[in-house]
Amino acid sequence: MELIFEVRDAEEGGYCARALGHGIFTEGDTWEELRANVIEATSVHFEDAPVHPRLVQLHYVKDELIAVEAA
């Protein structure tokens, strides 16, 4: 099983991540801290589950608005 996290920039700085299809949310000030927190949150969430994810994908989403002037 592969678990996918959607990662976005947090408003106060750092990153926030949520697992698609599961109630797992975490954050981190740095990318390295986020990765460690994702692994920990995933381990806790699936602690008693019969099936555990073998892979975790961090999908970084960056929204950017670009003003386009009318011609």
Image (spheres, rainbow, N blue to C red):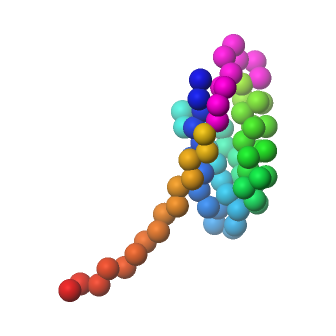
Q: Quadrant of the N terminus?
A: top right
Which quadrant of the figure has residue 24? top right
Q: Position of residue 37 (x, y in %)?
A: 77, 44
In the displayed structure, 26 sits above or below 12; it is above
Q: Is residue 71 above or below residue 45?
A: below
Query: Which residue does the image show at 77% across and 53% down from the upper left?
Result: 32
Rendered residue at 53%/55% (across/down): 61
Q: Does 50 lie within the magenta span?
A: yes
Q: In the image, is 39 to the left or to the right of 16?
A: right
**Nearest the camera: 32 or 9?**
32
Against 67, residue 45 (above or below) is above
Queried whether the magenta region covers residue 62, the answer comes back as no
> Is residue 37 placed above or below 55 in the rendered structure?
below
**Magenta stretch: dominant secondary structure:** loop
Span of residues in magenta: 47-56
Q: Residue at x 60, y 32 (%)?
A: 3
Residue 55 image offset from top left, x and y in percent: 64, 31
Q: Is residue 12 left or right of residue 1?
A: right
Residue 28 position within the rendered picture, expressed as x and y whole percent measured from the top left: 75, 55
